[in-house]
Image (cartoon, helix red, strand yellow):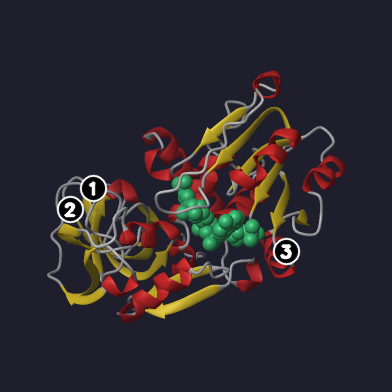
Amino acid sequence: MRAIAYSVTGGADVLRLVDRPVPDVGDNEVRVRIIASGVNPTDWKARTGVTPGEVLDAPRVPNQDGAGVIDAVGPGVTGLEVGDRVWVWDAAWQRTEGTAQELVTLPARQVVPLPPSASFDTGASLGIPALTAHLALTSHEATPMQLAKGSLAGRTVLVAGGAGAVGHAAIQLAVWAGASVVATVSSPEKAEYASRAGAHQVVNYRTHHVASELRAYAPEGVDIIVEVNPSANLATDLEVVATNGSIAIFASTTFGAEDPEILNVPVRVGMSKNMRLQFILTYMATPDRKDAAVRGVSAALADGALPVGSEHGLPLHRFPLEEMAAAHRASEKGVVGKVLVDVATPEQ
Ligand SMILES: NC(=O)c1ccc[n+]([C@@H]2O[C@H](COP(=O)([O-])OP(=O)(O)OC[C@H]3O[C@@H](n4cnc5c(N)ncnc54)[C@H](OP(=O)(O)O)[C@@H]3O)[C@@H](O)[C@H]2O)c1
């Protein structure tokens, strides 16, 4: 079968199209014929490595996210059958086998049914962005651990970088859950995408004062903040966050050796609001929270609340499998929208 793999960390040119044997299916495992593989920043960051040029002990197939059709089911698997349409999450986390290949074998827990109404494109866009967004929206004990339709009614959510993949998913999930959603963006084009995703209010932080806009929109403060750029935004977040509110930080806007610090948090301000400052790495979420996120995202998906595509605020940028390097470069350059790789056609 065809696969993309790399044996040494570094730039996108380390990615090679290779021929690999079809993987076996073990106990409690499922083999998925991948139709679409999703590319996220984590994929090219892993490929680059902490030290570019490091020779790996075994070749790695990149990409955490994907969607396809179940091809084989191992002993002990229940609730999943050959032929089921599915999406997968964290495929390459601490494993050599990501979704950039025609067939991938995964623990059954990481293979989730895709409802008939959801496209493979949608399925391949979910894993990293939507699960991270769910974790960010549910980090405080004052919020439900699992989102449901209407479960955030009466809350205000602020999504920083609302045209990013995580930001897009956060807007969609929060709107579905009944929150009032404000997004910040850096351009009119991104403002349009955040609106299409469903944000009720969009603030261009380059042309408007975010705290003033938020005070007018939500005088009692913002209950949940989904934060992509804490270095730039934390002071504003602390100003606008409500009592029992949360600021969930899911990104460092630098990559490599530099680790930005944001520790100038006024203790009494945070304490008096019983405020949660939560750092999130989707891979490290406890299994109960991750499973709750998968269930919450699945419920939103079943309700048709997570569509992708330009008309829904997330333009798609497609590449064939053999152009994985170009797909990684597009994500690395920060293309607006979702990078998808076509691995096979649904009929194959
Ligand atoms: N912790 C986790 O588990 C987790 C999960 C997923 C992603 N991430 C990380 O989160 C970040 C965003 O991921 P994504 O998939 O949403 O990416 P994306 O689709 O490329 O979106 C990134 C968005 O972040 C905003 N941004 C703010 N400051 C930025 C900066 N200095 N450089 C680049 N973008 C900046 C931009 O919005 P504006 O131009 O409107 O500001 C942009 O639209 C990445 O660093 C990724 O590695 C972490």
The numbered mark at residue 191 is 3
Q: Position of residue 43 (x, y in %)?
A: 37, 60
Q: Is residue 68 toward the left or the right of residue 76 in the image? A: right
Q: Mark 1 points at which residue?
A: 77
Q: Mark 2 points at which residue?
A: 74
Could you say which quadrant of the image residue 287 lies in?
top left
Could you say which quadrant of the image residue 286 lies in?
top left
Nearer-N-terminus badge (1/3):
1
Q: In which quarter of the image is the N terminus?
A: bottom left
Asked whether 133 or 212 is in front, the reply is: 212
Q: Is residue 309 toward the left or the right of residue 77 in the image? A: right
Q: Residues within 10 Å of mark 3 (few under 14, many from 20)?
A: many
Residues under labels 3 and 2: Cα distance? Answer: 46 Å
Tell me whether circle 3 and circle 2 mark residues in contact (CB < 8 Å). no
Mark 1 C-beta closer than 8 Å to ligand 1 = no
Q: Is residue 181 toward the left or the right of residue 315 in the image? A: right
When the figure is inspected, residue 293 is found, relative to residue 301, above or below; the finding is: above
Could you say which quadrant of the image residue 86 lies in?
bottom left
Q: In which quarter of the image is the C terminus?
A: bottom left
Q: Where is residue 246 in the image (x, y as percent from the top left)?
A: 63, 33
Q: Identify the element where label 2 is drawn.
A: loop
**Residue at screen point 31% across, 61% down:** 47
Q: What residue type is labelled 2?
A: Gly
Q: Where is residue 37 in the image (x, y as percent from the top left)?
A: 37, 68
Nearer-N-terminus badge (3/2):
2
Tell me whether circle 1 and circle 2 mark residues in contact (CB < 8 Å). yes
